Amino acid sequence: MKKQKRTGPRSKLMDAILVLLLARPLKASEIATNLGLETKYVSSYLSYWRKKGLVELNLGRWKLTEEGKAYAEEIAKKILNE
Protein backbone atom coordinates (compact mmCIF):
# COMPACT_ATOMS: atom_id res chain seq x y z
CA MET A 1 0.00 0.00 0.00
CA LYS A 2 1.45 3.36 -1.06
CA LYS A 3 1.62 6.05 1.62
CA GLN A 4 0.32 9.52 0.90
CA LYS A 5 3.00 12.17 0.65
CA ARG A 6 3.11 14.26 3.80
CA THR A 7 4.27 17.85 3.80
CA GLY A 8 4.89 20.59 6.31
CA PRO A 9 6.75 20.87 9.62
CA ARG A 10 4.70 18.18 11.33
CA SER A 11 5.70 15.56 8.78
CA LYS A 12 9.35 16.64 8.93
CA LEU A 13 9.32 16.13 12.70
CA MET A 14 7.84 12.66 12.37
CA ASP A 15 10.36 11.84 9.67
CA ALA A 16 13.16 12.91 12.03
CA ILE A 17 11.79 10.71 14.82
CA LEU A 18 11.53 7.68 12.54
CA VAL A 19 15.04 8.15 11.17
CA LEU A 20 16.43 8.43 14.73
CA LEU A 21 14.76 5.13 15.56
CA LEU A 22 16.54 3.44 12.66
CA ALA A 23 19.73 3.50 14.73
CA ARG A 24 18.29 1.87 17.85
CA PRO A 25 15.29 1.86 20.18
CA LEU A 26 15.08 5.06 22.22
CA LYS A 27 13.12 6.48 25.12
CA ALA A 28 10.82 9.38 24.27
CA SER A 29 13.03 11.61 26.44
CA GLU A 30 16.11 10.63 24.41
CA ILE A 31 14.33 11.46 21.15
CA ALA A 32 13.17 14.77 22.62
CA THR A 33 16.70 15.66 23.73
CA ASN A 34 18.12 14.85 20.28
CA LEU A 35 15.51 17.03 18.58
CA GLY A 36 15.41 19.82 21.17
CA LEU A 37 11.74 19.24 22.02
CA GLU A 38 9.66 18.54 25.10
CA THR A 39 9.15 14.86 25.89
CA LYS A 40 5.36 15.19 26.05
CA TYR A 41 5.36 16.58 22.50
CA VAL A 42 7.39 13.64 21.17
CA SER A 43 5.29 11.16 23.17
CA SER A 44 2.11 12.38 21.49
CA TYR A 45 3.62 11.75 18.04
CA LEU A 46 4.81 8.31 19.08
CA SER A 47 1.41 7.36 20.50
CA TYR A 48 -0.27 8.41 17.26
CA TRP A 49 2.16 6.44 15.09
CA ARG A 50 1.87 3.45 17.42
CA LYS A 51 -1.82 3.31 16.51
CA LYS A 52 -0.82 3.44 12.84
CA GLY A 53 1.56 0.51 13.29
CA LEU A 54 4.88 2.27 12.64
CA VAL A 55 6.35 2.12 16.15
CA GLU A 56 5.96 0.03 19.27
CA LEU A 57 6.93 0.45 22.91
CA ASN A 58 9.03 -2.25 24.54
CA LEU A 59 10.47 -1.92 28.06
CA GLY A 60 10.20 1.88 27.96
CA ARG A 61 11.94 2.26 24.61
CA TRP A 62 10.32 3.00 21.28
CA LYS A 63 11.30 0.95 18.27
CA LEU A 64 10.20 0.67 14.69
CA THR A 65 7.89 -2.08 13.51
CA GLU A 66 8.77 -3.77 10.23
CA GLU A 67 6.45 -1.34 8.43
CA GLY A 68 7.99 1.58 10.31
CA LYS A 69 11.50 0.42 9.47
CA ALA A 70 10.70 0.19 5.76
CA TYR A 71 9.14 3.66 5.86
CA ALA A 72 12.09 5.15 7.80
CA GLU A 73 14.57 3.63 5.34
CA GLU A 74 12.60 5.19 2.50
CA ILE A 75 12.84 8.59 4.23
CA ALA A 76 16.58 8.19 4.86
CA LYS A 77 17.24 7.29 1.22
CA LYS A 78 15.26 10.32 0.09
CA ILE A 79 17.25 12.60 2.40
CA LEU A 80 20.56 11.17 1.15
CA ASN A 81 19.55 11.74 -2.46
CA GLU A 82 18.68 15.42 -1.90
Image (cartoon, helix red, strand yellow):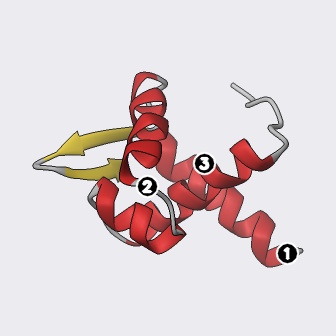
Question: Tag 2: residue type?
Answer: Glu
Left or right: 17 with respect to 60?
A: right
Question: Tag 1: residue type?
Answer: Asn
Question: Tag 3: residue type?
Answer: Met
Q: Please report the residue visible at 77 percent of the width from the left and 77 percent of the height from the top.
A: 80
Mark positioned earlier in the residue sequence (1 or 3)? 3
Q: Please report the residue visible at 47 percent of the width from the left and 28 percent of the height from the top.
A: 48
Q: Which residue, given by chain and number where applicable, does mark 3 sit on?
A: 14
Question: Of all residues shown, which one is farthest toward the front?
Answer: 38
x then y, percent, for residue 55: 39, 41
x then y, percent, for residue 40: 38, 44
Left or right: 47 with respect to 26?
A: right
**Dot 3: element:** helix
Mark positioned earlier in the residue sequence (1 or 2)? 2
x then y, percent, for residue 5: 83, 36
The foreground one among 17 and 33 is 33
